[in-house]
Image: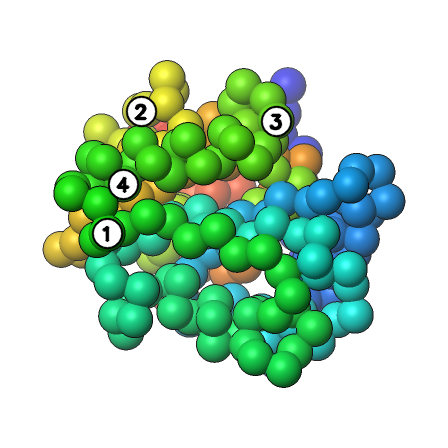
Amino acid sequence: MSPSYQLLRVQDPADLARRASELMAASIDIALDQRDRAQIALSGGSTPAESYSRLALQHLPWDRVDVLLGDERWVAADDASSNARMLRQTLLARGTPGAAARFHAVPTVETASPEDSAVAFADLVQSLCPGSPPIFDLMVLGLGDDGHTASLFPGTEAVDEQARWTTIGRGKGLDRITLTAPVLSAARQVVFLVSGAGKQQALARLLDASESPARTP
C-alpha cells in the first residue's frame, strides 16, 4: 500500500511555527476526545522550538497529556544540547498552560550507560503507551540534511532495529537514545517539520516511495 500523507508548504519560519502549533493542538484535542489521556512524542532541534512555545499557550487540558521525546542525547538534563532542556524552555515554560503537561524525560546520565538508558526508556514508553509496538497519539519528527530522523542515522544499526522499541543512535559524535522505526511508524498521527534550503534534497528522498530506508530512515 502506498504511503498516505499531506504536504503543507508555508511562507516562512513564523508561519511554520503557527501552523505546526495549531496542527499539534488539534491532534491533542482529538486524542483527548477519544481517550482519558494523550501521549505525544516530540523532536528536538531548532526547527520546532518556536512551534512548542506557541503550543504552550494553547488552552488545552494539559494535565491529561503525557509528553515524551522521540530521542535524546546522552547528556545531563541541563546540558545546552539536551532536548529536555529545550522543551522545559518552550512547551513546558513556567507560567504557560503547557507547563501543566506531564513530562517524562528520557533517562540519560543518571543511568550507568546508554544501554541502560535505552532499556529504561523502553520500559517507560511501554508503561505509558498501549500496544505492541506502543502507539503514540502524535509523533513529531524532524529531518536531517543527511536523511536521519529521531536518532536513526543512515547506515547505522539503529535503522534496522525492529524487535525493540528503543535503541542507541550513534551520530554526530554523541550517543543518543531513540525510539525505533516500528514505534515512530505506529503513531496515530506523524508530523515532520522541515525547514531550510539544506533539507530540500532530503525531503525529496523522504517523499520518494522507492527510496531506501537505509539511506533515508
Residue type at mark 2: give it. Asp
The residue tagged 3 is 130
Q: CA distance from mark 3 to mark 2?
A: 23 Å
Position in image of residue 26 (x %, y %): 78, 56
Q: Are marks 2 and 4 in contact (CB under 8 Å)?
A: no
* Disc nearer the start of the sequence (1/4): 1
Position in image of residue 64 (x %, y %): 71, 52
Q: Are marks 3 and 1 in contact (CB under 8 Å)?
A: no
The residue at 25%/62% (across/down) is: 76
Q: CA distance from mark 1 to mark 4?
A: 8 Å
Q: Which mark is residue 110?
A: 1
User: Is residue 177 something that shows in the picture?
Assistant: yes
Q: Which mark is residue 117?
A: 4
SS class, disc 1: loop
Sort mark 4 into few (<14), some (14-19) or many (20+) by Cα contacts within 10 Å.
many
Kindly report which numbered mark, 2 or 4, lies closer to the viewer in this rendering. Answer: 4
Q: Which mark is residue 125?
A: none
The quarter of the picture where the N terminus appears is top right
Q: CA distance from mark 2 to mark 4?
A: 19 Å
SS class, disc 2: helix
* Disc nearer the start of the sequence (2/4): 4
Residue type at mark 4: give it. Ser
* Disc nearer the start of the sequence (3/2): 3
The residue at 26%/70% (across/down) is: 79
The residue tagged 2 is 160
Kindly report which numbered mark, 2 or 1, lies closer to the viewer in this rendering. Answer: 1
Position in image of residue 184 (x %, y %): 50, 36
On screen, 53 above or below 2? below
For this rendering, which residue is in front, 87 or 101? 101
Instruction: Please give the count of numbered marks on the rendered protein.
Output: 4
On screen, 104 above or below 179? below
